[in-house]
Amino acid sequence: MSTDAGSLFQPVVLGSLNLPSRLVMAPMTRNFSPGGVPTEQVVEYYRRRAAEGVGLIISEGTTVNHCAANGYPDVPRFHDEDALAGWRKVVDAVHEAGGKFAPQLWHVGNVRRLGSGPDGNVPGYGPMEKRKDDKVIVHGMTRDDIQDVVNAFAQAAKDAKAIGCDAVELHGAHGYLIDQFFWEGSNQRDDEYGGNMDNRGRFAVEIIRAVRQAVGPDFPIIFRFSQWKQQDYSARLAPTPELLEQFLAPLADAGVDIFHCSQRRYWEPEFEGSPLNLAGWTRQITGKPCITVGSVGLDSEFLEYMVKTDKVAETANIDDLLQRLDNNEFDLVALGRVLIVDPAWPAKLREGRFDEVLPYSREALKQLV
């Protein structure tokens, strides 16, 4: 690496969010919270990243208080006294280490399968009903269901502010519930939540507005979105700048303060004719601060590790990332797998020990370090 990484470690003020560096811990599901409650091990996991120089810790996806929000074992929840007490410990530990903290609020939607906890009889919830062998496997959401989920997100955000969090992130990416409403393929409703892009975005807008009302005018709301989804990595939600603007404008107007722009590879231009990545285009369109993410610091993308493999991701040069940051293409940089395997990645970078960064392999997912 030949470019000075100092700009990554400059403090930045984004509205009411005062960050000690431009580094963000990306949300990554880890499945280490039995019963949905963060343990002391989870507290230490987040604290270490803040202590090593990450300015903003965004938690793994943590479910809102709805019967179908969860779809995976041992993921944390963001409701009820026991889980919130665990998160308060995380918040306090991150603050003591010098960082800021935001929970990612999550509903998995129709990805949920029968048998998933806490009540295995509850099917997935989604924009459209799905049946198999004359059995409902996805419940098509009614207007009352939609309002229940909107309320659940708002309450989780209110609780986040009450326990001392510095912001909240709404998970609107990767084929989960909010994202399911965005797509024509998964949302073929014939009411005000389906049809054109504005209608398909209505669910997200209502969540954002309800969260804004719950937390007040100055509490930061981050919104994560992606052009791709887990079910189709080549999908494009908005294949042109004009459609991206049509998609983003209502979300920004509803109250989003920061956009978290999920890419598989941050260095790829989003549209032909411009070097800007997704975060760059989003910042240009909305004027809002943006977080870039996608295989930062590694030579292969994360999708290669979604299946069992012996492949190892080695350290990659980030000169291009630093140049983009210095050119104000985006405001913050989120780190994913490099932080799973090496919590000291920021400190090693800052101190010029880039050759000491640990490589990533799928084995790293088996433990919290």
Image (spheres, grey):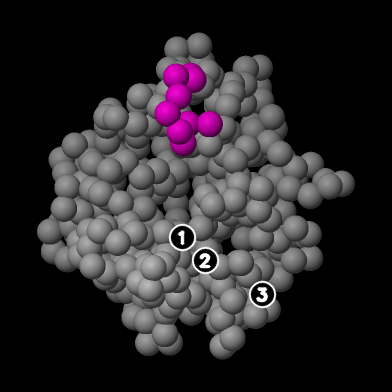
Q: CA distance from mark 3 to mark 1?
A: 17 Å
Which residue of the protein is positioned furthest toward the left in this rendering?
A: 82
Crowd band around label 2 with a 10 angstrom C-alpha radius: few (<14), some (14–19), many (20+): many
Marks 2,3: beta carbons within 8 A: no
Majority secondary structure of magenta residues: loop
Give the residues drawn in magenta, as a range.
304-312
Label 1 residue SS: loop
Nearer mark to the viewer, of 2 and 3: 2
Q: Give the residue at the far top of this rendering.
A: 355
Question: Residue 288 in the image: x percent, y percent?
Answer: 62, 60
Specify few, some or many for label 1: CA neighbours under 10 Å numbering under 14, 14-19, or 20 or more: many
**Quarter of image, res 123:** bottom left
Q: Is residue 285 above or below residue 352?
A: below
Q: Is residue 33 left or right of residue 269?
A: left
* Disc 2 from disc 1: Cα separation: 6 Å
Residue 110, position as x, y percentages in the image: 42, 64
Residue at mark 3: 197
In the image shown, does 132 or 150 lie closer to the viewer?
A: 132
* In magenta segment, residue 22: no
The residue carrying mark 2 is 180
Q: Which residue is mark 1?
A: 176
Q: Kindly tell me whether residue 345 is visible in this rendering.
A: no
* Label 2 element class: helix
How far from the left and from the top, in percent, is residue 280?
A: 69, 49
